[in-house]
Image (spheres, rainbow, N blue to C red):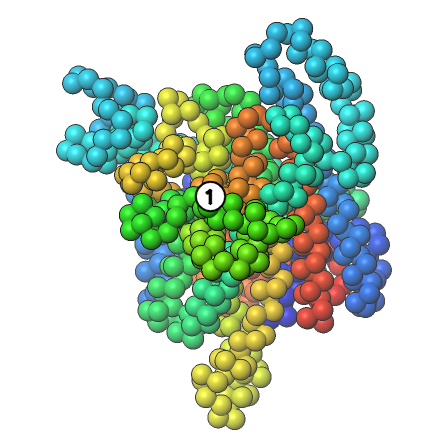
Amino acid sequence: MATATSASSTPSSPAAPAPARRKRGLPVVRQLRQSVGLQRGMLVAGLVLAAVFLLTAALADVLAPYDFNQLRDADGPFGAQQRPSSEHLLGTTVGGYDVLSRVIYGTRTALLVIVVAVVLSLFAGVLIGLVSGYFGGWVDRVLVVVCDAVYAFPSLLLAIVVAIVLSGGQSSLWGGIMAASISITVIFIPQYFRVIRAETVRIKSEAYVESAKVIGASHWRIMTRHVLRNATRTLPLILTLNASEAILTLAGLGFLGFGIEPTAAAEWGFDLNRALSDVTSGIWWTSVFPGLAIVLVVLGLTLVGESLNDLADPRLRSRRAAESGQTGEVSVVPGGPLGAGPAGLAGIEEVR
Amino acid sequence: MTTTTTTELTGSGPEADAAPAGGRRRRGGGGLGSYLLIRFLLIFPTVFVLVTTVFFLMRSTGDPITAALGGRLPAAELAARVREAGYDRPVVVQYVEYLGQILSGDFGTTLSDRRPVLDVLTTFGTATLELAFYALVVAFVIGIPLGRFAAYARDRWPDAVLRVFAILCYATPVFFAGMLLKLVFSSGLGWLPANGRASTRSEIIIQTSVDNPTGIYLVDAIRTGNGEVVRDVLEHAVLPALALGLLTAGVFLRLVRTNVIGTLGMGYVEAARSRGVGERRLLRKHAYRPALVPIVTVMGLQIALLLGGAVLTETTFEWRGLGFQLSEYLQARDFVAVQGMVVLLAVVVAVTNFVVDVIAALIDPRVRY
């Protein structure tokens, strides 16, 4: 059905927003053409960083000189905290692993977590938002209160609670990845919920929805064909931004010791946690490289999301008039425009 | 433009008010009094939702005693302890009992060191408060002027540099920022201390010469009247404040930039421009002030961000505050303590958000239902 295609085509690749509407071509290409000067520079830089991230994750086996959990080679153990050398380009960690290999394999863990977290929260958030906004009533009100409460709470603390619940000792690759992803999902659902709900409330009073009702379309059909189709335009933006937030949350969890065991997968936050004591004794290579990896990936994803956001926001882009005033009102990073767009408050009023 | 921004920004909090009480009033416009009342009442569902969520999440894995001691005690003794603490009863009974405890101000007692959670909060809360305050100062001092400058230099290279800087502030995890700062200024250059809130010597001086210490080291240090202690306390605060403050500074920078650009396009600025008011004066007098109001309204969300960041910053710098304590309890798998602290922080966040919204409503008459 049309739902399946429109919903599943969006999350397929979080780093580069997937084709939301194929008729008009890839959105990123369109925006690339639309952008000028500085904005184009930022978008291109972001896309390059994101592409490098994806390629590294895909080719980790080829690129990495050693395995992420390899402690010794033919010449014997690597040794702990070795300075960068020709054998270990970025040195070795306190646990005796090769830093470069762990940084490279870390992209794979990060990508997996992003994909799982974003897909999960997308499906759950969109579904709840759609149903809640479409049917309204007390369920809707309760859900709004619940989601707002969750939204206002420090997300890392919530992620910790969920991680405790899920990971109770789990340290396998998939166990760890699922624990991290689901913790992140719990934080993200309210965001998707808010955006989709607000859009749904706005769209359901449109004339074409009325007409669909008149000709006797079912609720499900209206929700999927008429509302969802028109409510998803802001999703590619949230996707890129949530992807970067997912990495930061994963790293935060890892730093607090809820990461994935070093023997199961490479995870940057966990490596930084291990490197904390190195810092005091002036050993820089164990912390700087995994940290830089986080910064560069988040930077790349945020630059892409940012540029898409700016290109869609009439306040930030002088061309094209305010025809689509709502498009840009997506929380970019904490502190950007918040809420679920202008339809947020107005949307609730319409319910009454 | 600012109008829409303001309502949207506050929309995040009060939007929760789908509660029946708010409905009729909003339509009628409502006064400040009814807004404050509704906003106050909203604290309760928010806290209730979080308490419930956290309780059932934590219980879904089993009881905290097994989590903390499982494998370390013989099964029979473990079962006896579980029964003694009442964790073998139905979850719903435990839940109702827990709600009752919270209403009476009892947030539980930690398993590992048998302290009331409320006591942990009052002991370590001041340290977190102090850190958050420093971080906010850093954020204001760095974020607001730079944001204004970025708006002024819009689409020219300083703007580009500042925008990338703002994104970098967001993209750098606070603990990595902290580790970099430590590498450079502490173990590299040796200018500033790496860990803790003060040197042991200063702590002893504070403890011996100040009666009823506030727990806020800067205040206590000033009360000792010893210049060296004050300096020592401040030196310890620089790196953590920078690490945590830069995160928020990036947010402020972007916010001020966007809003100043927004107000620069407003009719009254245009009118002033046509009267011949200079660009600099326009920026300073006309566009800047109204652009600051939304900062107050996002402060509420910043509190949540700061608290989350504080957990990581305090762990990085061994700053003995709530976050540091929380991660200690996490390491010890003391989930009674974790649950108690998370719930207590939920109350703190809800109340701070309320206060921030009240301030925003007092400043900006458009913030009403």
Pick whichever, A300 or A172, lies toward us: A172
Q: Amino acid at mark 1?
A: Thr
Q: Is residue A214 above or below residue A118?
A: below
According to the image, label 1 marks what residue? B200
Subunit that carries the residue with mark 1: B
Q: Quadrant of the C terminus of chain B?
A: bottom right
Pick whichever, B282 or A289, lies toward us: A289
In the image, residue A86 lies at what x, y percent? 14, 33
Q: Is residue A53 left or right of residue B203?
A: left
Q: Residue furthest front?
A: B209
In the image, residue A30 lies at what x, y percent? 39, 57
When asked about the image quadrant of residue A65, the answer is: top left
Pick whichever, A90 or A329, lies toward us: A90
Residue plotted at (39% across, 45% down): B194
Residue plotted at (75% across, 16% down): B84
Q: Is residue B326 above or below residue B366?
A: above
In the image, residue B311 lies at what x, y percent? 53, 42
Residue plotted at (16% across, 18% down): A75
In the image, residue B125 lies at what x, y percent? 61, 46
Q: Is residue A6 above or below residue B31?
A: above
Q: Is residue B365 left or right of residue B144?
A: right
Q: Quadrant of the N terminus of chain B?
A: bottom right
Pick whichever, A318 or B154, lies toward us: B154
Residue A57 visible to the viewer: no
In what element is the residue under mark 1? helix
Total numbered labels placed on residues in the image: 1
Residue B48 visible to the viewer: yes
Q: Is residue A209 left or right of residue B168?
A: right
Residue plotted at (31% across, 38% down): A281
Q: Residues within 10 Å of mark 1 (few under 14, many from 20)?
A: few
